[in-house]
Amino acid sequence: MDLISILFYGLPLFYLVYLIWKIIDRKRHQNCYILDYECHKPTDDRMLSTKFSGEVIRRNKHLGLLEYKFLLKAIVSSGIGEQTYAPQMVFDGREACPSYEDGILEMEEFFHDSIDKVLKRNKISPSEIDVLVVNISMLACMPSLAARIINYYKMREDIKVYNITGMGCSASLISINAIQSVFKNEKNKVALMVTSESLSPNWYIGNDRSMILANCLFRSGGCAILLTNKLSLKNKAMFKLKQLVRVHHGAKDESYDSCVQREDNQGNIGFHLDKTLPKAATRALVDNLKQIAPLILPIRELLRYAIVIFVKKMNWGSTKGGPKPMINFKTGVDHICLHTGGKAVIDGVGANLNLSEYDLEPARMTLHRFGNTSASSLWYVLGYMEAKKRLKKGDKVLMLSFGAGFKCNSCLWEVLRDLDNANVWKDCIDNYPPNTLVNPFLEKFGWLHDEDPDTFSVPDDYVIP
């Protein structure tokens, strides 16, 4: 009878313990870790100096004095320096007639550089990759770019593949989300995420001001990231994903139309940046922060903010027109990793989150050194933080990105060990931040402001100083 009683009462208990253990074990294997990442740095002969930028602009026969003045103002205030990179076809003088192969070769140059380095450094064979996610927004080819990577590196036949296009500058966190979903359902996986943008087939050659801005901001770059949910690799990991939130305002016409690829009146394809873009970005940012704030901030800060809002609404101890109550994200976040969409984007996010210049420095310096490299820009910003030895074990890093649609995505990473690799910044990190971010465009081309539109012309033998 005693044995029967033990079995009768013990088996359900053992089964309950087993179920709890299974839930805990499954939860442990659902974590998403970053093992390593490698940002692409093109060769020095691809740098866009002030002088060469002037030559590229001059080659565009659709531009007149008014467009020159507009571009000068835009470039001077862009926050971009003289060491950013452009595709090879620009240096070949073929931006008006790029070939199909130009876009493919631009991507393959990045693939073979960054993927090779990150796999070799971590002693991981291409055959060990279980999941491949590639996001290149503005280049679709057949076979896909993901298929080209699989073919070149001879990856396994059962590899899970995701080739993402059209997601814009927010594509990195969308790709992370896709990998996270796989990790939640399958154990012991290694993923490779590849993020970049192909500028070769998308260089605008018209004179529409809303579309020519893209040429001033977007530059060549890319990043390859290794991720895993293997517990055996946890001790080698750099970051652990804590939260991820995505917001899409595509249903709002104003947001949808704020940045769109289209043709101008002359049939030239380009990327239109509308005047409503700042408003669309702010609206998406606010909605995203409303969702992620309760997930990452301490309760005391949420309560403080709620009380301040309540008091202001009740007008207790407050006057109309006073400063707007702001939530302090630095109470739960140590570093802010911003998308380098442009100086205005960085300034806007800084103002909305009440960030200091120290907080904004990584994004400003990345914009100055590498420009807007689309979805990969977040990783250059992260690289700057690492090169400056800012990232310490236990720190929390909040990533924020924006993209056409209109989208705002965010995620929180926990730093798992002290990081100090200079990575893509190793040749120039000691020069940052510079004494000034002013570029020499105004010095070289300021004379345009004194020209008369009715008599202006650029001599064929004019030499740019």
Image (tube, rainbow, N blue to C red):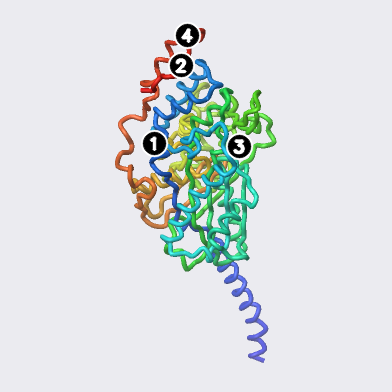
Residue 83 badge: 1
The residues tagged by marks 2 and 1 sit, at their Cα atoms, a distance apart of 26 Å
What residue is rendered at 46% in x and 30% in y? Answer: 343
> Which amino acid type is marked by label 1?
Gln
Kindly identify which residue carries mark 2.
458
Which one is earlier in the sequence, the residue at label 2 or at label 4? 4
What residue is rendered at 56% in x and 56% in y? Answer: 149
Query: Depth-wise, is mark 3 or mark 2 nearer the camera?
Result: 2
Task: Estimate the x, y position of residue 234 in percent, counting from the top left.
Answer: 46, 63
Query: Depth-wise, is mark 3 or mark 4 nearer the camera?
Result: 4
Mark 2 crowdedness (10 Å alpha carbons): few <14, some 14-19, many ≥20: few
For this rendering, which residue is in front, 197 or 25? 197
The residues tagged by marks 4 and 1 sit, at their Cα atoms, a distance apart of 32 Å
Proximity of marks 4 and 1: CB atoms separated by less than 8 Å: no
Residue 452 badge: 4
Residue 404 badge: 3
Proximity of marks 2 and 1: CB atoms separated by less than 8 Å: no
Image height of 147 relative to 438, above or below = below
For this rendering, which residue is in front, 355 or 228? 228
Proximity of marks 3 and 4: CB atoms separated by less than 8 Å: no
